[in-house]
Image: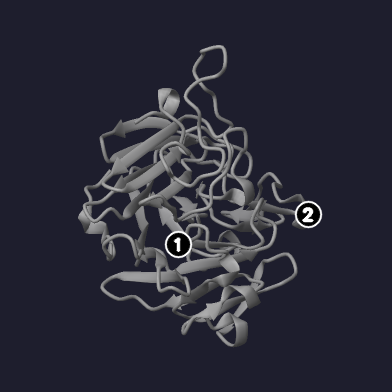
Amino acid sequence: MDLTNSSSLHAADSGAPGGPRAAALDGSPRRYASGRQYELRRGDALAVVTGLAAGLRLYSRGGTQLTESYGDEEIPPGATGITLAPWANRVEDGVWHLNGKKQQLDITEVANNNASHGLLRNSTYDLVDESEFSVTLEAAIFPQHGYPFLLRHRVRYELADDLGLVVRQTLINDAPEPAPFVLGAHPYLRLGEVPSEDLTVTVRARTRLVTDDRLIPRGTEPVGGDFDLRAGRPVAGLDLDSAFTDLEFDGGLARHTLRAPDGRSVTLWQDATCGYVHVFVTTNFPGRPKAVAIEPMTGPANAFNSGDGLRWLDPGERFTMTWGISASLDQCLDQGFSHPAAAGES
């Protein structure tokens, strides 16, 4: 449902700060810095999706907020909830080579002189389809300096039967030649009002990518110390901005979990198309002493140069990555995990 004329998220007991309001004071339709808002409800689950970057502004269960959110007049802080195409993370100096010819992307991470988070971070996605429990949005990636290809990025959000959130990101090549890509997403997880520093993060990955001071991978090594999250580590002691691979897949899914001291948990899962996950623990998220992003990716930073995880999409072909969020909460039934097959294709 489009939120242009809906009640506020706060009134819906979402727990989100500064939730959307129905209309401006003069009675005109409310406008949001993150674009058109789409609200999905099923049972006690609520998801709010934005037209800007096909982002996830909120996912909650029973009034317990499971993702970080932001106000009506804000763009996503720290890229929270946005989807990433045709690359995730960074391209060093914004430079890569196509058939021996240098390609120069716009520098969007000025501090490190990198091209960051793809080409659709500031783009509006159009509505393709919506139903009571799902919404599908799409945006074109037009040929431009540094990326001379025409593609479409289609994103489908669905609240599944078990009330978990399922997200499918599909890239479609409308160009007459193969196009390189990495897909990803940038959700931040939380557990209601529990401070993130009181949570334990578990990521079952055997290898981490070693980066330079510009966060460009220069090699890999087995996880160890604060980078070994397989048995769970307290968020309070972590300062991470690292990608991991060699993930443990069970039933075709890798699962990464934040757990509270009372046993409640929220989990991000990703399918086997996503061989990498980036974990970002920051002290710079507005209003939160610490926040935790867990980012599913089909490839790591600088894949356009390293080739690690890089895929090429042939003309007319499409590729889909699938991920989602589920939770186990005291006040509701254990959700379990929504397998991608639980919801129809976009």
- The crowd level at tag 1 (other Cα within 10 Å; few <14, some 14-19, many 20+) is many
Closer to us: 149 or 114: 114
Closer to us: 11 or 170: 11
Q: Secondary structure at mark 2?
A: helix
**Residue 146 location, quadrant:** top right
At a point 36% along the width and 62% down the height, the residue shown is: 327
- Which residue does the numbered mark 2 point to in the structure image? 111
For the N terminus, give its image quadrant. Answer: top left
Closer to us: 178 or 227: 227
Q: Secondary structure at mark 1?
A: loop
Q: Earlier in the sequence, mark 2 or mark 1?
A: 2
Which three-letter amino acid code belongs to the residue tagged 1? Thr
Residue 317 appears in the picture as rendered: no
Q: Is residue 136 left or right of residue 236?
A: left
For the C terminus, give its image quadrant. Answer: top left
- Position of residue 285 measured from the top left corner of the image (x, y, whole percent): 65, 54
At a point 21% along the width and 52% down the height, the residue shown is: 161
Q: How many marks?
A: 2
- Position of residue 186 measured from the top left corner of the image (x, y, whole percent): 52, 54
